[in-house]
Amino acid sequence: MLPHINSSFMADLTHFDPNSIGNTNFNIFGLPSTEEEARLVIMPIPWEVTVSYRGGTARAPDRIFNASFQVDLFDAEFADEWRKGIFMRDINEKILTKSDYLRKEAELYINFISQGDDINDNKFMCKTLKDINAGSLFLNDWVYQQAKGLLDNGKLVALLGGDHSTPLGFIKALADQHNEFAVLQIDAHCDLRKCYEGFDYSHASIMYNVLEQVPQVKKLVQVGPRDYCQEEAEYINASNNRVKCFFDREIKEALYEGATWKTITQAIVDQLPAHVYISFDVDGLDPKLCPCTGTPVYGGLELEQVFYLFKNIIASGRKIIGFDVNETGVSNNEWDENVAARILFKLSNMLLHCNAK
């Protein structure tokens, strides 16, 4: 049974002007809610230890927070949902420091194995890999405890990464409350590699770990993958339809041949059960939208297409139970962070709408 929500804790917005400039003395999006008052709490996870290409995602939560004050609060489709309260917790500096330290270790390790060297011949590299895997396990447990505490207190929860390894603990916490749900993954990659580069909890292994460790996830529906390996293709084919992938190439070819995005969207929605968790890797989008993402790939989706899909999930009567936004890079002009802030706001409104009391 889900916890009872006490609506008396909602923020007093009597003197708050949603049409004014974002007040940086307030919380994310310039909203005056405290954590106690907010219906939705965003957990920022400044972590990027196992990224395999470009770094920067650990700093993204703070940068997205800063960009959020430029987001207009009026949402024509989900008006006033923000009034229920959205709050983002402070960046945990100990987690960020741990990520920075282990990331330097991971860079040395990745450079070592990329030259074809065997780590079994190098005691330092063996220890490095052990330390990284232990650190990632610590992060997963920490995220689980943070998310569980919020969920048990009746909060809606969202996660803001960081790299794509970060939401595993959150998904496990949701599984404590939901016996059956799907993960809808927006991504340029399948993230179904087992122990990629030797990392038990690589960002490229997140969905493999979800499927192997969270039996409550009955379905994984992937939209937009266009860069994946044979191992992942074989895993999908052997999944007995637990994984359904709408590859970017197949989507584009269907559109070229006369299909509409509406019909494709309906086919995606039909794969989903009643409860849906959304995992949004921004590299699933056309790279023009978030060019500084960690592992960009040409092609991808327009943001309007993705929002249209989410809207149709809600229109079908299905419920969004949580979400993450991850793999946002750090840009020179806050463009990536600006786009990510708008993704975060739209998904927050949708989550609040689906869980109205």
Image (spheres, rainbow, N blue to C red):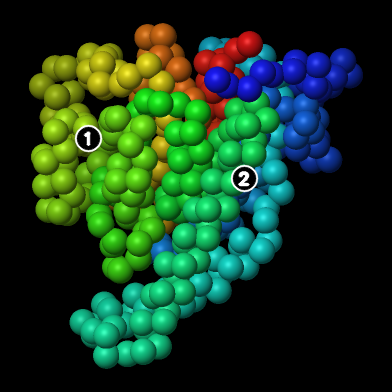
- Name the disc covering residue 28, or none: none
Image position of 72 with respect to 126: above or below: above
Residue type, mark 2 in image? Gln
Left or right relative to 317: residue 156: right
Residue drawn where x is 67% and y is 53% of the image: 91
Left or right relative to 9: residue 185: left
Q: How many marks?
A: 2
Residue drawn where x is 35% and y is 62% of the image: 200
Q: Quadrant of residue 301?
A: top left
Q: Position of residue 318 (x, y in %)?
A: 40, 14
User: Which quadrant is home to the N terminus?
Assistant: top right
Residue type, mark 1 in image? Val
Image position of 81 with respect to 208: above or below: above
Q: Position of residue 41 (x, y in %)?
A: 65, 34
Q: Position of residue 206 (x, y in %)?
A: 36, 49
The residue tagged 2 is 146
User: Which quadrant is home to the C terminus?
Assistant: top right
Residue drawn where x is 14% and y is 24% of the image: 254
Residue drawn where x is 27% and y is 85% of the image: 120
Left or right relative to 97: residue 179: left
- Name the disc covering residue 243, or none: 1
Residue occupying the far front of the picture: 1
